[in-house]
Amino acid sequence: MKNYSFIKFSLVLLFIPNFCFAKEWNFDVFMDGKLIGEHTFQLKEEEKFHQLMSQANFKVTVLSIPIYKYKHISQELWNKNCLHSISAVTQDGGDEYKVLGKFDTNTFRLIEPAKEAFSAECPMTFSYWNPLMLKQSKLLNVQMGDYVEVEIKSLGKKIIKVRNENLEADSYQLTAPKINIQIWYKDNKEWVKLESITPDDHHISYILR
């Protein structure tokens, strides 16, 4: 049987609030062409901090029998485009991970898991919803708490289908250890699609509703 720990490629990823959000991204998630769940991102912009809430739920079945489940719930506070704090919980199969951290004077301190603080004037997560992420050389993995080096390059404009319409979008490739992701933005601003090849060669697609 194939190893379905593929979800550990760590897409960045919450509690459903009782207020309206300024922006939302709602994706159906497919693995090898089969629907396995959904991932939603909700951003509330306030005067001082922006609140990003994200929730992912995936379930892989064989002959209608669940063989793998993944759930990721995360809450992030952003000082404009810089990460201020994070609280995330992930259930990856039988494993559970927690990430708690806060920014303080050019240093981001991880409370859980216990790791050395890292220096960063403006830290960011794998925040696909914010195109400024594309200019970063390091990003915080919100599942494992690792601050990893990334390589991001432009692939030019591509014609893709979004909500059953053909759309010209700017395409980028993001790579890091065990991560190979392609992202599309409309007019280099609006996130509209994501695809990933996992370490065990599964094809993950985020399709915007």
Image (cartoon, helix red, strand yellow):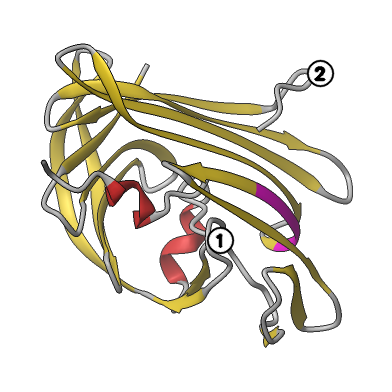
Q: Which mark is residue 125?
A: 1
Given residues 81 and 149, the one toward you in this image is 149
**Stretch of the chain drawn in magenta:** 83-88
The picture places residue 168, in percent across and down from the top left corner, at 20, 35
Given residues 196 and 185, the one toward you in this image is 196
In the rendered image, the residue lying farthest to the right is 48
**Kind of residue at badge 2:** Phe
Residue at 48% across, 57% down: 126
Secondary structure at numbered mark 2: loop
**Kind of residue at badge 1:** Thr
Counting residues from the start of the chain, the first of labels 1 and 2 encountered is: 2
Residue at 76% across, 83% down: 107
Classify mark 2: residues with Cα within 10 Å, few (<14), some (14-19) or many (20+): few
Q: CA distance from mark 1 to mark 2?
A: 24 Å
Residue at 67% across, 74% down: 122
Residue 33 picture quarter: top left
Residue at 14% across, 14% down: 63
Asked if 16 appears above or below 134 in the picture, the reply is above
Identify the residue under disc 2.
19
Secondary structure at numbered mark 1: loop
